[in-house]
Amino acid sequence: MRARSTRSSARVPARRGAGARGAFQLLAAVLSVALVAVPPAAAAIRSPRSHASANPSYAFVHDPSMIREGSTYYVFSTGDPAGVIGGGNIQIRVSTDLRTWRYIGTVFPTIPSWILQRVGPIPNLWAPDISFFHGLYHLYYAGSSFGSNTSVIALATNVTLDPSSPRYHWVDRGEVLSSGPGDNYNAIDPALAYGPSSSTWLAFGSFWGGIKLVSIDASTGKPYSASPRLYSLASTAAPDAEEGSYLTRHGSYYYLFVSAGFCCRGIASTYQVVVGRSKTITGPYVDAYGTSLTQGGGTELLGADQGMIGPGSGSVYHSASTYLFDYHYYDAFDGGAARLQVRHLYWTSSGWPVTGPPLVPVPGAPAGRS
């Protein structure tokens, strides 16, 4: 809405949609028959009964964004639409080893009233992105109704992520961008990016014209004007099923990661992560075969694998030479529950990213599988 054994984990870049899915893609296809009558938004979550009994540290982790403060990794993720975990607000989990995660609460106690006034009654907040610049942690997130581009991207800031600190306090900075039926974009799935000379940019978008990019004033965390220029980075043919983008730099290229396909359908989800690169942050981005991402291109980075169905809506954590890719998937062994996964990103000699083995155990997997 928005990473195998070590010997075989570095996968050669594949043309979009051409990656091997293996036995579990077949499993997903077979089991998806049971989901066709389920509304898409509901298929991604578990029943309230199983949801309530599930460990909140693992139940419903969707659209994660990861950062580290000190020795602690923090993951922020979409609010639970069932309202069981955190009442629909942006969730926070922590880890010191990237394998074991602990739920510690939400950013806000309630959905900000101005968002409800702007987009109408909604059950949850979506797709947060956490970054640090200009002396503050910046949390971008979205409010929208499923299947609509009546949406708003909002911003909250904090001086620390440690809830035990007396300085810990999230400040609501209000609206960053919005969209409506008259716009050819959808103001959801924000992702902060850094351009030349430490300039700040925000990638966003979902369906409705694909992935966009806008320049951000680092002092405010918002666009420089009320009508900023929007750059188009990626799009496909109607219904333009691309979202959950993220930008990072490696070497002399900017890399654009995009979630292509349909999320939020549990094991019937068709999400996959594709990537393109460009010498300039505003594009054009092309895949390993030279096809522009604005023409439907994209080299596959992640597809369904080992019972982890529909991977997508990820972000890149980068520190020194370490690159990590965190994302959600739907667990074929646990009724399509949305889970967190983290993998190392490695870079081939030709400069394209590949993924390492999964770091987070799969809760629903048979013993010894992960």
Image (cartoon, rainbow, N blue to C red):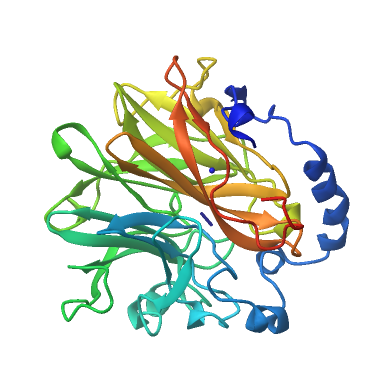
Tell me the quarter of the picture where residue 250 sits: top left
Question: Is 254 situated above or below 82?
Answer: above
Residue 199 in the figure: left or right of residue 328? left
Query: Is any part of residue 118 visible from this angle?
Result: yes
Residue 38 in the figure: left or right of residue 126? right
Residue 338 horizontal/vertical position (percent) = 62, 62
Name the one closer to the observer, 206 or 11. 11
Tell me the quarter of the picture where residue 94 sits: bottom left
Q: Give me the residue at 38% from left, 53% from top.
A: 190
Question: Is 141 situated above or below 5?
Answer: below
Query: Is any part of residue 209 visible from this angle?
Result: no
Residue 185 horizontal/vertical position (percent) = 44, 48
Residue 267 horizontal/vertical position (percent) = 74, 55
- Farthest-out residue, front: 368
Name the one closer to the observer, 310 or 148. 310
Name the one closer to the observer, 354 or 178. 354
Residue 127 in the figure: left or right of residue 356? left
Residue 139 in the figure: left or right of residue 362? left
Residue 336 horizontal/vertical position (percent) = 72, 61
